[in-house]
Image (cartoon, rainbow, N blue to C red):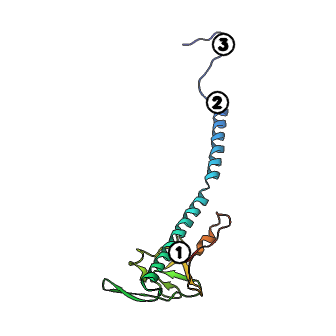
Amino acid sequence: MNKTKVGEAVRKSGFTLIEILVVIGIIAILAAIVIIAINPAKQFAQARNTQRQAGVNTVLNAVGQRLADNKGIFAGAFTVGGVTYTCPTIPAGPTGLTDGVPPGAELDLSCLRPTYVATIPEDPDSTITAGTLTGYTIAVDATGRITVCAPQAATETSIPGAATICVTR
């Protein structure tokens, strides 16, 4: 048994509650600073917009290749490997794109598959139903320049000044 002399303090090893709370507080402050600096919502929004930019360019490149192969005319039928594909006329006003179903006011660009593009890109926003509307629009102006847009990019509230992504060629 350890005996202490009168006046000697007994020293115990370990941390006090105050020391532990101070360390936890410092870690919490540093974690908050890191989370604010990283801003995951903004990072995810920027990733979706990057995917939209790639999708717009993919559609525009496929349409451009179809125009190049068909002497500047997009609409019309063509046969590849015994399968006949029919491309519609691109309208003057912005029209939603679809990958074949459902038919309606949207422009069906399934004729571009598989000759010009493996799949028609779809907007990364989860509110757009896969296999129907793609989330992109297409239009042709009076001079024949084609514009493909991703209007969902303007709905990214975590990016200040978010706007529709459009590319014209």
Q: Secondary structure at mark 2?
A: loop
Q: Residues within 10 Å of mark 3 (few under 14, many from 20)?
A: few
Q: Which mark is residue 8?
A: 3
Q: Which residue is mark 1?
A: 128
Q: Residue at x 60, y 70 (%)?
A: 153
Q: Which residue is mark 2?
A: 16
Residue at far left of view: 82
User: Which percent across, then down, holds residue 120?
Assistant: 46, 76
In the depicted view, which residue is nearer to us: 72 or 76? Answer: 72
Task: Give the alpha-carbon distance from disc 1 to disc 2, as whole Å.
Answer: 55 Å
Mark 1: amino acid: Ile
Q: Are marks 1 and 2 in contact (CB under 8 Å)?
A: no
**Mark whose residue sits in front, 1 or 2:** 1
Residue at far front of view: 71
In the depicted view, which residue is nearer to us: 143 or 17? Answer: 143
Task: Give the alpha-carbon distance from disc 2 to disc 3, as whole Å.
Answer: 20 Å
